[in-house]
Amino acid sequence: MDQQIFASMIIKYWYLIEFLGQSDFPVQSREGRELCSKAAKGESRAKQITVYHALSTQADKLAKEQKTISMEPYAALQKDKHIYSSYGVLSDEIHVCVGKMERYLFAECLQRAFHQDFELPEKNHKPICLIGLKCDEQATYIPGSIRVSPLAWGIYQLLTPDN
């Protein structure tokens, strides 16, 4: 096989893996919640903690399930500044994930669209973020930070006849 063709195949494979390898929707682990709880009480010596908040009115149910408080980004930062005062630096960015969908639904959509019945190794029920963006510590959108899920964008491109 020609080296240039082989290199092209490798690049296409790498691109496909990167494209389909979108990270799961971020969820705080049980250990992370425990670490934050200890840090709030001054019982942790961890150098860094990551705090998660549910930030929408629809997130109230999720917040209750995860035993967190639903609030606006600015209020969340102000509260964290007080609770975790022993940590000298708060992030100057808030990462916001808008919407989520279970990963396997994308594969099922492709199956229906192309009338194919390929077998999936297993249904991946972990959700992925549909849109992500960043805000500063004042909850102001950081220009250029919005990202659309590559899976959602790719399927839209495949299924839209004008593209």
Image (tube, rainbow, N blue to C red):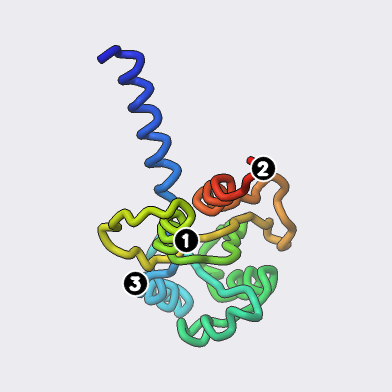
- Which is closer to the viewer, label 2 or label 3? 2
The disc placed on residue 99 is none
Question: At which x and y percent is residue 61?
Answer: 55, 85
Residue drawn 72% across the image and 55% down it = 141
Whole-percent x, y for residue 151 in the image: 50, 51
Q: Which residue is mark 3?
A: 31
- Residue 45 as seen in the image, left or right of residue 57: left
| Label 3 element class | helix
> Residue 162, labelled with which disc?
2
* Front of the two marks 3 and 1: 1
Give the amino acid type for the residue marked by disc 3 in the picture: Glu
The residue at which mark 1 appears reads as 128
- Label 2 crowd bin: few (<14), some (14–19), many (20+), radius 10 Å: few
Above or below, comparing residue 138 to residue 2 in the picture: below
Residue type at mark 2? Asp
Q: Residue at x 65, y 80 (%)?
A: 57
Which amino acid, mark 1? Ile
Q: Earlier in the sequence, mark 2 or mark 3?
A: 3
- Give the quarter of the figure containing the C terminus: top right
